[in-house]
Image (cartoon, rainbow, N blue to C red):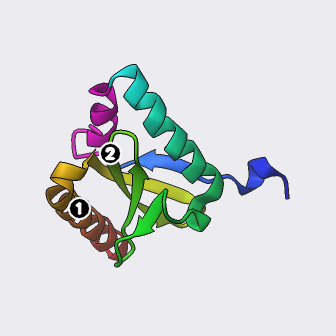
Amino acid sequence: MSKEQSKWTIEYWCNDKGESTVEEWFDSLTDEQFKSVAKEMKLLELCGNLLKLPHSRSLKQKLFELRERKYSFRIYYAFLPNKIILMLHAGNKKTQDKDIEIARVRLAELTRDEEK
């Protein structure tokens, strides 16, 4: 299997209007901050569910946290079938508790929709 075939695909959660809060969050970052986050996301895309601390950690119940350390940014995500990583929400360490709760609600909605 080539590296290209083993790569994961990153997608973004969108609201009913098709807006992605994670992509909007990316737009608010400086170029240097975005480069730092992009580096961690590239690592996640390449390693998928094999990526561990200090880059990624499980928050249990199928929710994971991508940890950008230079600026203390966090991106919350879940693994879906067919090697898809769904980015649910993003923020920084200071807003972590609220951000995790938002990501959990989005993941629960997604799971509920798939069961219908």
Going by the numbered disc 2, the residue's amino acid type is Phe
Reply above or below: 17 against 28: below
Of circles 1 and 2, which is in front?
2
- 39 or 101, which lies in front? 39
Report the magenta residues as a range: 14-29
Residue 110: quadrant of the picture: bottom left
Reply above or below: 20 against 74: above
Residue 112: quadrant of the picture: bottom left
Q: Is disc 1 surrounded by few (<14), some (14 to 19) or many (20+) residues within 10 Å? A: many
Tell me which numbered mark, 1 or 2, is placed earlier along the sequence: 2
Determine if the magenta segment contains residue 31.
no
Please give the label number shown on residue 100.
1
Residue appearing at x 26%, y 40% in the figure: 21
Identify the residue under disc 2.
Answer: 73
Q: Position of residue 67 (x, y in %)?
A: 40, 53
Going by the numbered disc 1, the residue's amino acid type is Ile
Secondary element at image label 1: helix
Determine if the magenta segment contains residue 17.
yes
Q: Position of residue 48 (x, y in %)?
A: 59, 60
Question: Which quarter shows the C terminus?
Answer: bottom left
Reply above or below: 40 against 108: above
